[in-house]
Amino acid sequence: MDFLTMTIGKQKNIALIAHDSKKHEMIAWCDEHKEILKGHFLCGTGTTARMITEATGLPVKGYNSGPLGGDQQIGAKIVEGRVDFVIFFSDPLTAQPHDPDVKALLRIAQVYDIPIANNKATADFLITSSFMNEEYEHKIINFHQNIAERARTL
């Protein structure tokens, strides 16, 4: 199976997501890293995006709320190459009604080799990485070739 080299640009397309119990932690994190974040394109699930914008002044494009399909919208943007970095403060101690959507988002980020932070410590490491200020090349599966090969052998 061949791979394609993809490039994450200097200006990152960052998705910001937080479960309800983690929204205030996400807002504080965004405020702490505001100078870095303002140099990138930000998007997020509905309530989280709105709360970050109201609290920090950072422009965050909002999609639907997570339980209403926002996680899936962001997953689709990853597939389209329009989200290349995810910060997702998830709550591992509370059951989420949209847990399958969350798992699908995490899976698609992994398939497309997208950096994803699930907690503050990982987000701190990622946002302060030297890769935040430069292009980053990574390899993903050549899906067109993979589909053609599968169709040929079935």
Image (cartoon, helix red, strand yellow):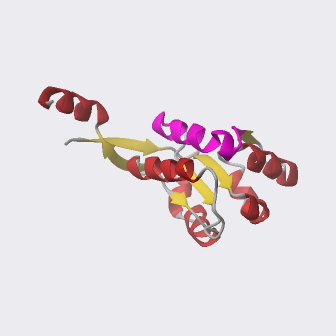
Report whether 148 appears left or right of 30.
left
Q: Identify the residue at image location x=37%, y=50%.
A: 138
Q: Position of residue 24 (x, y in %)?
A: 79, 63
Q: Identify the residue at image location x=64%, y=70%.
A: 93
Q: Is residue 84 above or below residue 19?
A: above
Q: Is residue 55 magenta?
A: no
Quadrant that contains the N terminus: top left
Q: Identify the residue at image location x=15%, y=30%.
A: 154
Q: Is residue 113 above or below residue 7?
A: below
Q: Is residue 119 above or below residue 106?
A: below
- Please tell me how many numbered marks the rendered image carries: 0
- The answer to whether residue 17 shows anywhere in this view is yes
Give 1 or 66, whichever is nearer the viewer. 66
Q: Position of residue 133 (x, y in %)?
A: 56, 55
Give 62 or 125, whichever is nearer the viewer. 62
Give 94 or 30, whichever is nearer the viewer. 94
Q: Position of residue 26 (x, y in %)?
A: 73, 61
Report whether 2 appears left or right of 114.
left
Q: Residue furthest right?
A: 54
- The answer to whether residue 44 shows anywhere in this view is no
Task: Report the span colored magenta.
Answer: 62-81
